[in-house]
Amino acid sequence: MKRPTIADIARRAGVSKGAVSYALNGQPGVSEATRKRILSIAQEIGFNANSAARALSGARARAVGLTLCRPARILGIEPWFMGLISGFEAELGAESYALTLQVVATPEQEVEVYRRWWGERRIDGVIVTDIREDDIRIPVLQQLQLPAVVIGGPGDTGPIAQIWSDDAGAITEAVRYLVALGHHRIARVSGVADLLHTQNRTKAFEAVCAALGLDHALTIPADYTGEEGSRATRRLLIGGDRPTAIIYDNDVMAVAGLAVAQEMGLSVPGDLSIVAWDDSPLCSLVHPPLTALSRDISAYGAQAARELLAAIDGKRVGNVEAGRAHLTPRGSTAPPRQDL
């Protein structure tokens, strides 16, 4: 939990602490080359001179950071994020911690936010979502010694603790259920393809379909939005050998897919069965209500927040496997018609 100091910069730059102070405050007394080297090191290790007062006092920020590398419009429409954040808030609020949220466009921007927050003493730790293979954020968090908990995986995050759900087991349950109903042409509309949990789901979907002898299993990548869910559904349904069942990686895309099927004159579940990942009120408000993979997202968020607070307190935290999603059958799934 050691935060960067002027002494750290001085040691790495091979200069005195006074020289570092001159460079950071724009004062004469150091060469331009030395000033640039000092400023570069300060940025690299996440030091910000404006936070000196808090650093000297040793006070905590009493805040936890969350950056989301997703289109901002998704936050207003995807219940998963709202459930997750409500879990964070419930746990953090009980300990008088605030949640600092920022939406970014790229993982590189996310890294810069971490450096700035940590250097300016705005946060005491971060919750990291949407883990990727060879994720560039992980080595930066390790370098900064910034307390963190990763939601998602399992993946290689080194000493940084992870909390994840058994997505492979959940999708296997969904496919086996559809096959038991009599479906043999099953497709999936996935989330963002480069996310680790999406890749884990795709591998599990392909594996269970192969094990059950399903020759027409297909995954179409999307981005969790209704627009992309609609496009992917149309692509699947206009083909000559259209699926009789589709699994969607979130509820928003599933609702959009339901609308497309009805727009094309297909009956749900007679002509097409639909399964949504992560149950929400959306799944129960449409007609027919959607069969969904259900889990307590708020509890998932609360558990991640507890792990992070423990890490901030200097306690040793390890990887945690949370309860996996289980199928909740509703009106959107049924045996396929015999003529399909």
Image (cartoon, rainbow, N blue to C red):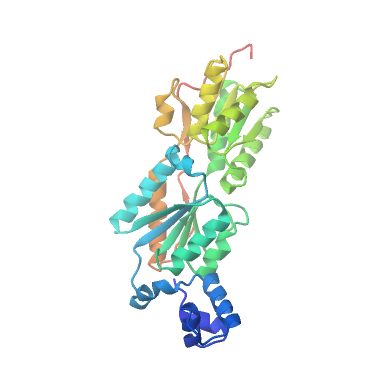
Locate residue 16, reporting x and y percent.
Answer: 51, 88
Q: Is residue 236 above or below residue 249?
A: above
Quadrant assignment, res 15: bottom right
Give the camera-side residue of 89 and 187. Answer: 89
Q: Residue at x 51, y 36 (%)?
A: 250
Can residue 176 be seen at all in this image of the molecule?
no
Give the camera-side residue of 57 and 266. Answer: 57
Quadrant assignment, res 171: top right
Q: Residue at x 45, y 38 (%)?
A: 78
The single residue placed furthest to the top in the displayed view is 339
Q: Residue at x 45, y 62 (%)?
A: 317
Identify the image quadrant of the N terminus: bottom left
Give the camera-side residue of 221 and 291. Answer: 221
Locate residue 293, reporting x and y percent.
Answer: 48, 34
Can residue 284 be seen at all in this image of the molecule?
yes
Locate residue 280, reporting x and y percent.
Answer: 41, 34
Identify the image quadrant of the C terminus: top right
